[in-house]
Amino acid sequence: MPTRTYIDSQSNGGGRAGAGRSVTDAVTAPGPGGSLPPVDVGLVLTGGGARAAYQAGALLALSEILPAGAVPFRILSGVSAGGLNVGLLGTWQGDFEDASHRLRELWLELTPERVFRTDGKRMVGIGTQWMRNLSGGGFFQDSRINFLLDATPLRDFLHERVAFADLKRNIASGALRGFAITATSYATNTAVTWFDGDPDIENWVRATRIGIRTNLRLDHVMASASIPIFFPPVRIQGAWYGDGSVRMTAPLSPAIHMGADRLVVIGVRRWRAPSELQQVRPAAKREALPPSQIAGTLLNAVFLETIEADVERLEMVNKLVEKIPPAERGELRPIPTLMLRPSRDLGHLAADQYQRFPRFLRYLLSGLGAKSDTGSDLLSYLAFEPIYVGRLIELGYEDTLARRAEVEDFFAVGRRDERVPLRA
């Protein structure tokens, strides 16, 4: 395959061929003889706690729209809870439809008890240590509590159901070109992308993010999905890591670094028209804003904003490249991107989930002002309840089926004998 040259808008002007790939564009033009190499389609999944169940529904619809066969994404990149979804796809050794159904089943098996410890003894113990630390003014230096929810059940759940050892086999067989998981380093305050894949994929370094080849394990997935304060940091090779969305400002970049020619991105935020953003909101009904609403806004900023901004950035660069006459583009060409989004607000869908939370967790959340009528955004990140998860899966499925024509056009379904074939 001819080498690819990528331009990185954050690298102060280019870089080595095959390295420095980021959201800004460029892959090679046709190789010798005018033939195009097979297209590597990348899948990018970001996070949002329980909201990532929407992605499972969208993937299920994609498996029905596309021709039967292997997983159509040779490049997988996950951040936060999106890493859980790409983890199953990257280790799957059957066809795409079976993988999508299995992912749906896994999400429907989740309950709060399978994500974090909900027994009163453990939660009271965590709450007591927090109160002791906050009231002690630093007197208790030996405390190891830096989280609200013990995620040990989620680790056990994934360990029993996802065979991470099969990831290496899929890379060796060529089913995968690259696989990446991103977390945040608490020591360096950077986004660290751990990846594995074809030998020609090189490490990369940018101002606030790096990519390191490594043997990926369940620990990396758990670190990527560890929402700060709510879930405990994960220690890997002596350093502490947390949710990748905190510091990853360019979530499309790992997939492009690994050689993606096209991208499918599944977000977990409803698209809002500019006119909707400009509307004047009604006056507040309360004299004071509840902390739960503030926390929900902060979580939205961490988990929902960066992917939207990165896709917009890529679309702008694509348009600029398209304005260059083809004969003058050299090695540059746009990277087509298919962005799938919810048609409804996933936070609003969680508004009635408060009463289904474990009793002591309801007690803690009520202290933040989160109840059935307030704090729905915050609740949506923690609502690992079958009813809410089922709603999101169904919505993702229906939203994606509604865009069948766009999906078929993007993947050139029915035209695979043309000069840009896809590799499964």
Image (cartoon, helix red, strand yellow):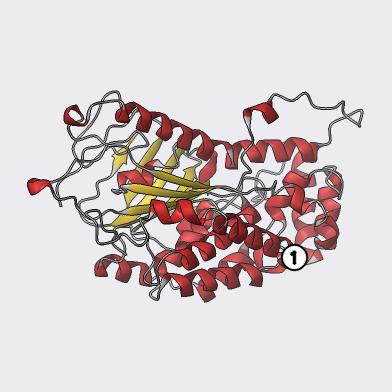
- Rendering coords of residue 40 (x, y %): 30, 54
The residue lying toward the viewer, choosing from 98 and 145, is: 98
Drawn side of residue 228 relative to residue 73, left or right: right
Q: Is residue 189 visible?
A: no
Task: Please state the horizontal and vertical placement of residue 151, each as a whole percent of the image.
Answer: 63, 61
Q: Quadrant of residue 91?
A: bottom left
Residue 66 seen by the camera: yes
79 is higher (above) or lower (below) than 11? below
Q: Which is more toward the observer, 164 or 67?
A: 67
Residue that protrudes farthest toward the left in the picture:
33
* Residue highlighted by disc 1: 387
Q: SS for tag 1?
A: helix
Classify 45 as above or below 336: below
Q: Quadrant of the C terminus?
A: bottom left
Relative side of 329 to 158, left or right = left
Between residue 82 and residue 235, name the one nearer to us.
82
Q: Image point 37% across, 72% down: which residue?
A: 69
Q: Position of residue 313 (x, y in %)?
A: 44, 31
